């Protein structure tokens, strides 16, 4: 019967191999785990982890935080918080994923009662991927808009209004009428009547930079508020579609394809940062910008302020992407005996040094912008979207060859964002793979592309005229408290309930037995320091500033300083975009 079914032994073997490869093309012949697959090379994993951890926040949030919190002095609490909170959580998640080779949801077989923590991580990753690709779409749009002989936001063009100006605008002044009477009028009245302001009587207001008006009026076509949705901005929708096509193309074979793409997307940003730093350092005023960032202007008295330490802790926490599920997902494809301890050290240090390095590239050019505009550096420094799409483009527009530098900058933002997006989508597909392994083996490509299509459609609301408000809203509520609370529950569940010593024994099965002194620091952090730090920074455990008796006469001495209860307050927490509350 066998001969009737298979006349040639070699043909049968060939047929088997083709079938297996068609169902398991994401699994290599030399992979240790033939069900899920492994990274082709360790460098694939390390670059994927670096690309995931090093994101937009390293460029558009850390430099501003450093400047705002004492310059070089900020590096002290930043390094301390890395050692006390960032690195322990990073090592914990890498070890956890590698040990069990499971997704962020299935990994909670370690403690089934806490499986909701893994579901929370994946849900947050889904929401974040929706708007994170919108930010990538913004970068694509600006990169394409830069392919002109002159950057479109260099001057106030037809899209600008009367407030568009790089210098202060006269709003009111005194004029002398035909009768000799001196009256105070607004600027429009003066121009309409062909009169001249009396010297020294002008009242000024800051003008809006051309880059700011271009961002709001052209790129976003921003509406007045979230209640005015408007139409879909077609060119942003096309950029969003292109962003999702890039992500889908990079991930259609899972880690086997994304692991190769990151050789470019993870390394290229460093090349651009180096080029921008070299160019910035040659500009007049660059030294002034750098001195504000981390030089002579450093203020060590800031270390006495609790807010500085809070900013350092939260920046470390979000910069390393802990509690998002991505670290567990990427590490789950490691071979069992991979040295995840050294990997965690390398990735964390690379991430933090990148943040510091990026600050020099940013502030050298902002220093030049301040110099040519006759302003202080503090007047041109921005954070988040304002830095990436207003302040820095404005500075680039003043450089010779501005379009070239603009293309480089926005292409760098594109690659920075794509790395993080790859890992976030991989988190989602890895979760599906562990829940439905047979389906995923046969239909990995359709499922991956289907996820990208659904997320693209969900993201269309973010490219309407009210889209920027949705981006801020999702960013604030999805990339804020949920992540912090998930991290607290994660470390409590694994270290306090499953057992920290038991978990250390699991790690030693992978990396080999270590002396007790090796684990002393990790025990201190995992059991006590890191959980207490995280709980300390959950300020929602404290009453809001407007809590207390509604009527002032009932407040007495205890509540005399409370905020008016009619005013809404918000618990601030840094997010992906660098903004602190939705606009």
Image (tube, grey):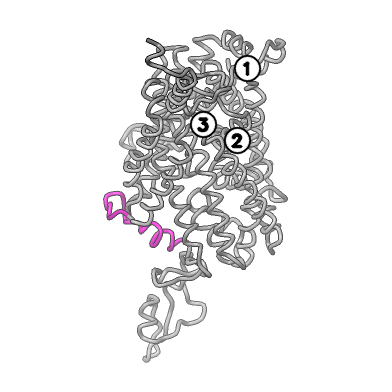
The Cα–Cα distance between marks 2 and 1, rounded to whole angstroms, is: 19 Å
Q: Is residue 560 visible?
A: no
Name the dominant secondary structure of the magenta segment.
Answer: loop
**Which residue is disc 3 drawn over?**
255
Q: Residue at x 31, y 36 (%)?
A: 551
Question: Magenta segment range?
Answer: 212-232
Q: Residue at x 56, y 39 (%)?
A: 262
Asked whether residue 311 is drawn in magenta, I would say no
Specify the label residue 337 is tagged with. Answer: 1
Q: Quadrant of the N terminus?
A: top left
Residue 257 lies, in percent from the top left, at 51, 36
Specify the label residue 194 is tagged with. Answer: none
- For discs 3 and 1, the disc positioned in front in the rendered view: 3
Q: Residue at x 31, y 46 (%)?
A: 461
Residue situated in front as seen by the camera: 64 or 206: 64
Q: Earlier in the sequence, mark 2 or mark 1?
A: 2
Q: Residue at x 68, y 63 (%)?
A: 283
Residue situated in front as seen by the camera: 452 or 413: 452
Tell me the SS state at disc 2.
Answer: helix
**Which residue is disc 2 drawn over?**
47
Q: Earlier in the sequence, mark 3 or mark 1?
A: 3
Q: Are marks 3 and 2 in contact (CB under 8 Å)?
A: no
- For discs 3 and 2, the disc positioned in front in the rendered view: 3
Relative to 12, residue 311 above or below: below
């Amino acid at each position: 019967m066998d001969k009737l079914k298979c006349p040639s032994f070699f043909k049968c073997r060939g047929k088997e191999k083709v079938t297996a490869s068609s169902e398991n093309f994401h699994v290599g012949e030399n992979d240790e785990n033939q069900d899920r697959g492994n990274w082709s090379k360790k460098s694939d994993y390390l670059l994927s982890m670096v690309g995931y951890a090093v994101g937009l926040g390293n460029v558009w949030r850390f430099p501003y935080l450093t400047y705002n919190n004492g310059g070089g002095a900020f590096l002290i609490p930043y390094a301390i918080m890395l050692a006390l909170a960032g690195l322990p959580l990073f090592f914990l998640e890498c070890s956890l994923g590698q040990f069990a080779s499971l997704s962020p949801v299935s990994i909670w077989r370690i403690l089934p009662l806490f499986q909701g923590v893994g579901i929370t991580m994946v849900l947050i990753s889904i929401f974040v991927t929706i708007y994170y690709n919108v930010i990538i779409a913004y970068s694509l749009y600006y990169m394409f808009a830069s392919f002109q002989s002159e950057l479109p936001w260099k001057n106030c063009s037809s899209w600008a209004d009367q407030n568009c100006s790089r210098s202060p605008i006269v709003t009111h002044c005194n004029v002398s009428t035909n009768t000799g009477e001196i009256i105070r009028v607004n600027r429009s009245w003066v121009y309409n009547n062909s009169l001249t302001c009396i010297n020294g009587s002008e009242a000024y207001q800051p003008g809006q930079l051309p880059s700011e008006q271009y961002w709001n009026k052209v790129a976003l076509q921003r509406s007045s508020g979230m209640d005015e949705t408007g139409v879909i901005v077609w060119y942003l929708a096309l950029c969003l579609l292109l962003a999702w096509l890039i992500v889908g193309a990079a991930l259609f074979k899972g880690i086997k394809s994304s692991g190769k793409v990151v050789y470019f997307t993870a390394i290229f940003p460093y090349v651009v940062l180096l080029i921008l730093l070299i160019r910035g350092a040659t500009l007049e005023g660059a030294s002034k910008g750098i001195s504000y960032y981390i030089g002579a202007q450093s203020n060590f008295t800031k270390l006495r302020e609790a807010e500085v330490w809070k900013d350092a802790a939260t920046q470390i926490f979000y910069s390393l992407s802990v509690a998002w599920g991505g670290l567990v997902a990427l590490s789950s494809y490691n071979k069992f005996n991979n040295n995840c301890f050294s990997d965690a050290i390398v990735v964390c240090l690379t991430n933090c040094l990148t943040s510091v390095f990026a600050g020099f590239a940013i502030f050298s050019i902002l220093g030049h912008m301040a110099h040519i505009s006759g302003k202080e550096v503090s007047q041109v420094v921005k954070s988040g979207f304002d830095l990436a799409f207003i302040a820095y483009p404005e500075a680039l527009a003043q450089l010779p060859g501005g379009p070239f530098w603009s293309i480089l900058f926005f292409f760098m933002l594109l690659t920075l964002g794509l790395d993080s997006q790859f890992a976030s989508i991989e988190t989602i597909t890895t979760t599906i793979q562990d829940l439905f392994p047979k389906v995923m083996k046969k239909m990995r490509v359709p499922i991956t592309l289907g996820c990208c299509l659904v997320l693209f459609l969900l993201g269309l609301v973010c490219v309407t005229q009210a889209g920027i408000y949705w981006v801020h809203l999702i960013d604030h509520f999805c990339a804020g408290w949920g992540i912090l609370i998930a991290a607290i529950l994660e470390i409590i569940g694994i270290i306090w309930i499953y057992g920290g010593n038991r978990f250390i024994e699991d790690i030693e099965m992978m990396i080999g037995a270590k002396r007790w002194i090796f684990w002393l620091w990790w025990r201190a952090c995992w059991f006590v320091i890191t959980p207490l730090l995280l709980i300390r920074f959950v300020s929602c455990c404290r009453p809001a500033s407007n809590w207390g008796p509604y009527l002032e006469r009932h407040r007495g001495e205890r509540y005399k300083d409370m905020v008016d209860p009619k005013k809404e307050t918000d618990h601030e927490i840094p997010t992906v975009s660098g903004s602190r509350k939705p606009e």
